[in-house]
Image: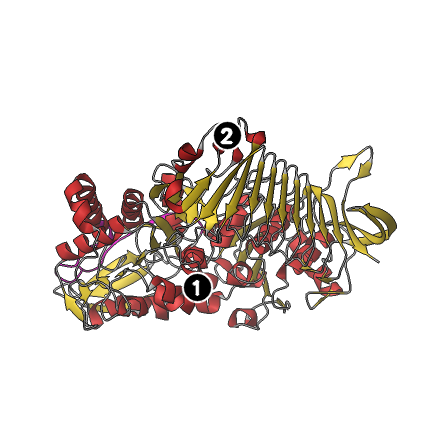
Amino acid sequence: MPKKVENVGCPYCGVCCDDLVVTVSDDGKQILEVENACAIGNQIFHHATGSERIRLPRLRQPDGTYKDISYEEAVDYAAKVLYNAKKPLIYGFGSTNCEGMAAAAKVAEKAGAVLDNCASICHGSSFLAIFDNGYPSCTLGETKNRADVIVYWGANPAHAHPRHMSRYSIFPRGFFTGKGHMSRKIIVIDPRHTDTAQVADIYLQVKQGHDYELFDAFRAVVRGHEIPDVVAGIKREQIVEVANILKKARFGTIFYGMGLCHSDGRNHNVDIAISLTRDLNDYTKWTIMAMRGHYNITGPGAVWSWQYGYPYCLDLTKKDIAHMNPGETSSIDLAMRDEVDAFINIGTDAGAHFPIDAVKHLRKHPWITIDPNINMASEISDLHIPVGIVGVEVPGIVYRMDNVPIQYRKVIDPPEGVISDEELFERIYRRLSELEADEAVKEHAKAAPEGVRAGE
Amino acid sequence: MKTVTLTLTNPPKLLLEGQNITPDNFAGKNTAEIATLDLWEGKQKIPLGKHFTVAGDGGATAAETKIVLRGDCTRVKRIGQQMTAGEIVIEGNADMYIGGWMQGGKIHVKGNVDSFCGIGMEGGELIVDGNAGCHLGSSPRGEWRGMKGGLIRVAGNVGSDTATFINGGTIIIGGDADIHVSTHGEGGTVVIKGDAKGRVGGQMVKGDIYVYGTIENPLPGFSMVGEVEQEVDGETALFAHHIGDLGERHPVSRGKTVYANLYTRL
């Protein structure tokens, strides 16, 4: 009799849907059906048992092929790479649990590494703005139950967060929002007429890269000042109209995405969005929220801020001092400036996401990928270590985009012998401690371990 | 004044962090002692003498010590960081944080510098003959009290985010500036003798900006109030006077609202 597991959390996007129902086969080895999830979340569950999985770490050989090795050998290799590097970089963590992140931070501190997460190429600029200007935010539950005006600025949840609009922002009927979308005003501001813009009551097609000017105009209008006839491609009358809607809202939330974080100005776009939110609170209640991408990319920010005081781009090379300055200690900048000499890619795909020049620089040095699946990074690595899929095979804490922690559960066991991120990092940590304690090893380990730098 | 000459003879593989290269640290030390000061390359601590050839002794105090750096210091960071007095001359390029958190003395870079130079500066003089990267004279991340004093003079162009949260002091740029000048500024003066790309004075509360060339994308939050003649960097010229950022909060002094001033040359 197949078993139905209810209230399962989805390991895909920052919305962290926790209402999934997963049907597992009699023997507990196959996932048969996933209910309530979006197409992408659905696929993540089916991919776990419906495809051939890597079950052992693979080490690059001199002829360029991969050879299966044991976890013990892989842990030893990873520890030696970290130990011998002058400035190793550990990057990723978009798709793992907080337990794994904490264990990785222990390793980074021990190894004197730079510790960074996907926010570095995503919402990192939001952190910088939040440092400078605060974060008048709320939970998604508050938005659902109270908001009557929703702004999506530079975000396209229809594609990136498929259930965001139906669970929290536009369509749900909340405590004070019983009429659902009938009583909500939706404003979408984006240079592209996205699928999210299709459901908007008002769509402003801002000139690409000029969001800051438009925010500045909104702020000036909210304070009762004159503005030019056209700002960032939007007519004055329309800006005034929208500003009045914002001021007259009962409760509003600005959801923003990569359109602000990754167009010119980056953190300043978010910074002025926060300033506008603060201004609007002179009239009514307004909140702002980053549309965090992965289901637990908010996690490393929470975990590492608690451990070291900084959410990302942590330079722990001095071991007793944590230093953080994106532009210098951020993964892309370190790679482009050729400042790191070892790279661990965990729970993300730097091979696909990084600029090609950054990948080329990183590829000059040992590259280790820790990921359940084959991806572009795993295919150019020196070592690929498979781990269990969090949320499917490994339980743990994840943080939703509004900084609410949720306990994820597992629905099946990982393939036989495959360990979790947390266990892997704990084992690397133990091996590092041994290397550190053993002065004799230090002398031998200076040479790169066997198998490294294949085919070059 | 005594001169210590450092020549980079053994360049680093990755980078060098040279926060110890300041007149304050060199004062009262002889050649051999200076060569034992620490540099960092990632997690490795290295004596200065391993990368640099040291010639000359330091003066009795920082004010009596001059440091001359020769060789390609393009990958040496943090030279002159937190210095309080004395002089540093860098004959070529230098990397990040040159003159960061500087309190006094003078740094003269004859080449280009990278980002974060002069951040959190409180006093002294930073002269760059070439170009500077981003975050020149800016505030460190999360710090809302930026540059407090001193003078930064860059002959060439600068990157983005110049003078964020500036509170005092002067920055004079000979060439062009990329986006974001004096964002969140609450004082100080920035002079751009070339063109500015845009977002000049965004979220600015107080302070002055002079732009001699054009502003490609002026902010809607600034409005022109008249024409004034002003003396800037030793020459007098006619400027259009704008006030702003009208969207930002502004203090009231003696019954009058204080705005930030943006002057564009006529």
- Mark whose residue sits in front, 1 or 2: 2
Label count reads 2
Q: Disc 2: which chain?
A: B
The residue under label 2 is B27
Q: Residues within 10 Å of mark 1 (few under 14, many from 20)?
A: many
CB contact under 8 Å: marks 1 and 2: no
- In which quadrant will I find the C terminus of chain B? bottom right
The residue under label 1 is A161
The amino acid on which the numbered mark 2 sits, given as a three-letter code, is Ala
Can residue A250 be seen here? The reply is no
Quadrant of residue B139 within the rendered picture: top right
In this orientation, which residue lies closer to the viewer: A283 or B101?
A: B101
Measure the C-alpha gap from mark 1 to mark 2: 59 Å
Left or right for A194, reference A232: left
Q: Disc 1: which chain?
A: A
The amino acid on which the numbered mark 1 sits, given as a three-letter code, is His
Counting from the top left corner in percent of width and height, residue B217 is at 70, 62
Residue at 19%, 50% in the rendered image: A445
The question of residue A63 being in magenta is answered with: no
The tag on residue A144 is none
Write the start and end of the magenta stretch as one range: A402-422
In this orientation, which residue lies closer to the viewer: A191 or A283?
A: A191
Residue at 24%, 59% in the rendered image: A5
